[in-house]
Image (spheres, rainbow, N blue to C red):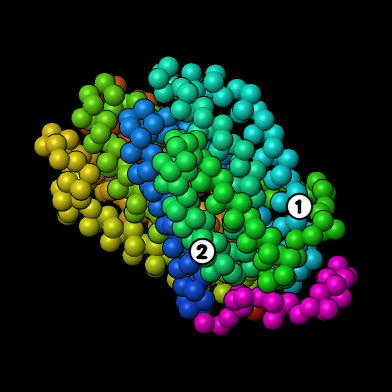
């Protein structure tokens, strides 16, 4: 054992040994069972998080068109802020799982503590900057004079809880990285229930309107951070979050930031891609915009379980990589591929076959339905490749390979899609819009396949070297 870890063991011997503290043993030999036990709670938690947005929209929608428009206007801001948290969280989770695999418990704790310490001032700076420029931001986004007051009320209140939201996102990644995806799931579930109960109380009973919806979200974030504080103070996991473990060494911060940066950029580009898609559909009329919106929603529903599965499984890959157990990494990656490809292909086939009844769930308009059916079919032609993209991105993040991770993760909604959606509709009209999504999906899938085979070959060579 190296010297830092000797220090760590002395510190925690008063409580419990590292192995006993860990909720799920990441070295469990039953790999398929381990991955499923980690991934399923992550899928459920991610779904709960998405459902929370739907519940908020339902209650706010009862206030009228201007209220729902005001809340919708804040979506780009929320996506940007969440993207920052996801980027820091991905980098932190990769750092933690790799060092846990190497048996470097103190270094894993330092990474977690440092990430949270950096997140707090980042959250405060973003909050102040956005509050000072909120009206100008909404004017840029196109808020009308009737929507502006509600948008400022909602966003202004919500921003006061942004630092808590940022910390909660990172805390979720930390506990998942050490194998406790169930705690993360139950924390999100608690926050969701509290938000759903408080929404009607604050919005209608206390007559706070859209500000009430934001306050309900704020209270739910306070509840979530309280649960995470209890988790870390009661030493429920192997990672110790303490002030004494904060380290602002440049190399450590670089590891946290560089691995997570592609995840942040991917989230931001996803929001930009949707905006560009709607913008490209606008010249073809409101029916086309509605049809594209339906197709995007159905596409997002299919991506949700695959993304959640990969987030939950990341700890296994990172732990195996840190332990230099290349056989385990290969086996885990192949199992993840079999699950995600099966899910993405099955969903793709189901949408293509049942496009019409699926679209009818969202629209009664015959014209919108006709456009949406063809849009859904084209958008999902190559969705079967999404499972490969997700696993390869997760694998690269787990290995700490930031640049290669950026190439794979930014392809689908970035350097392949954006030029296509700006150019193809001009040349081929609405069919060009449809082709832009399909071609970007196909191209990103091919890039992911190429990188996957290269990574597998490298792992096999490392395995042979280790055995010789």
**The N terminus, quarter of image:** bottom right
Q: Nearer the viewer, mark 2 or mark 1?
A: 2
For residue 13, what is the image quadrant? bottom right
Work out whether mark 2 precedes mark 1 in sequence or the reverse, and give the earlier one. 1
Seen at 27% across and 42% down, the residue is 295
Task: Tell me the distance, in whole angstroms, between the alpha carbons under discs 2 and 1.
Answer: 24 Å
Query: Which residue does the numbered mark 1 point to in the structure image?
Result: 114
Looking at the image, can residue 244 be seen?
A: yes
Q: Residues within 10 Å of mark 2 (few under 14, many from 20)?
A: many
Which residue is painted at 22% across and 44% down in the image?
A: 362
Position of 459 with respect to 278 (left or right) is right
- Circle 2 SS class: helix
- CB atoms at circles 2 and 1 under 8 Å apart? no
**From this viewpoint, which residue is outermost toward the left?**
366
Residue 453 position (above or below residue 105): above
The quadrant holding residue 28 is bottom right
Q: Is residue 156 above or below residue 397?
A: above
Query: In terms of depth relative to the viewer, which is nearer, 217 or 81?
Result: 217
Judging by the rendered image, the residue that carries numbered circle 2 is 185
Q: Secondary structure at mark 1?
A: helix
Q: Which mark is residue 268?
A: none
Q: Magenta segment range? A: 1-30
In the displayed structure image, the side of residue 433 where residue 4 appears, left or right:
right
Q: Is residue 459 visible?
A: no
8 drawn magenta: yes
Q: Where residue 139 appears, x then y in whole percent? A: 48, 18
């Amino acid at each position: 054992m190296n010297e830092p870890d000797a220090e760590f063991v002395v510190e925690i011997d008063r409580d419990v040994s590292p192995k006993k503290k860990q909720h799920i043993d990441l070295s469990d030999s039953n790999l398929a069972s381990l991955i499923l036990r980690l991934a399923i709670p992550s899928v459920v938690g991610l779904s709960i998080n998405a459902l929370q947005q739907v519940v908020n929209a339902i209650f706010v929608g009862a206030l009228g068109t201007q209220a729902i428009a005001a809340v919708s206007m804040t979506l780009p801001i929320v996506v940007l802020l969440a993207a920052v948290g996801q980027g820091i969280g991905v980098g932190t989770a990769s750092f933690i799982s790799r060092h846990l695999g190497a048996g470097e418990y103190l270094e894993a704790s330092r990474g977690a503590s440092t990430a949270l310490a950096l997140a707090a001032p980042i959250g405060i700076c973003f909050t102040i900057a956005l509050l000072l420029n909120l009206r100008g931001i909404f004017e840029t986004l196109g808020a009308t004079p009737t929507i502006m007051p509600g948008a400022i009320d909602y966003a202004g209140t919500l921003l006061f809880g942004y630092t808590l939201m940022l910390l909660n996102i990172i805390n979720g990644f930390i506990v998942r990285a050490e194998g406790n995806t169930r705690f993360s799931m139950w924390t999100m579930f608690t926050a969701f229930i509290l938000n759903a109960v408080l929404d009607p109380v604050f919005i209608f009973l206390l007559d706070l309107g859209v500000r009430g919806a934001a306050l309900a979200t704020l209270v739910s974030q306070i509840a979530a951070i309280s649960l995470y504080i209890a988790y870390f103070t009661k030493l429920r996991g192997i990672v110790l979050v303490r002030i004494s473990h904060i380290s602002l060494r440049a190399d450590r911060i670089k590891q946290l930031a560089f691995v997570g940066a592609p995840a942040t950029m991917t989230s931001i580009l996803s929001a930009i891609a949707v905006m560009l898609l709607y913008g490209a559909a606008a010249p073809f009329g409101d029916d086309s915009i509605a049809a594209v919106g339906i197709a995007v929603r159905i596409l997002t529903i299919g991506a949700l379980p695959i993304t959640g599965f990969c987030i939950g499984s990341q700890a296994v890959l990172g732990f195996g990589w840190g332990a230099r157990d290349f056989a385990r990494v290969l086996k885990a990656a192949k199992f993840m591929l079999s699950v995600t490809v099966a899910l993405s292909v099955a969903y793709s086939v189901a949408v293509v076959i049942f496009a019409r009844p699926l679209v009818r769930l969202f629209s009664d308009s015959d014209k919108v339905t006709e456009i949406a059916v063809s849009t859904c079919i084209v958008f999902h032609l190559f969705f079967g490749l999404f499972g490969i993209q997700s696993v390869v991105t997760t694998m690269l993040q787990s290995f700490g390979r930031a640049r290669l991770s950026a190439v794979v993760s930014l392809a689908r909604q970035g350097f392949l899609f954006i030029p296509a959606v700006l150019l193809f509709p001009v040349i081929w009209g609405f069919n060009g819009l449809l082709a832009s999504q399909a071609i970007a999906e196909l191209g990103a899938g091919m890039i992911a396949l190429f990188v996957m085979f290269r990574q597998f070959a490298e792992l096999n060579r490392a395995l042979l070297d280790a055995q010789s």
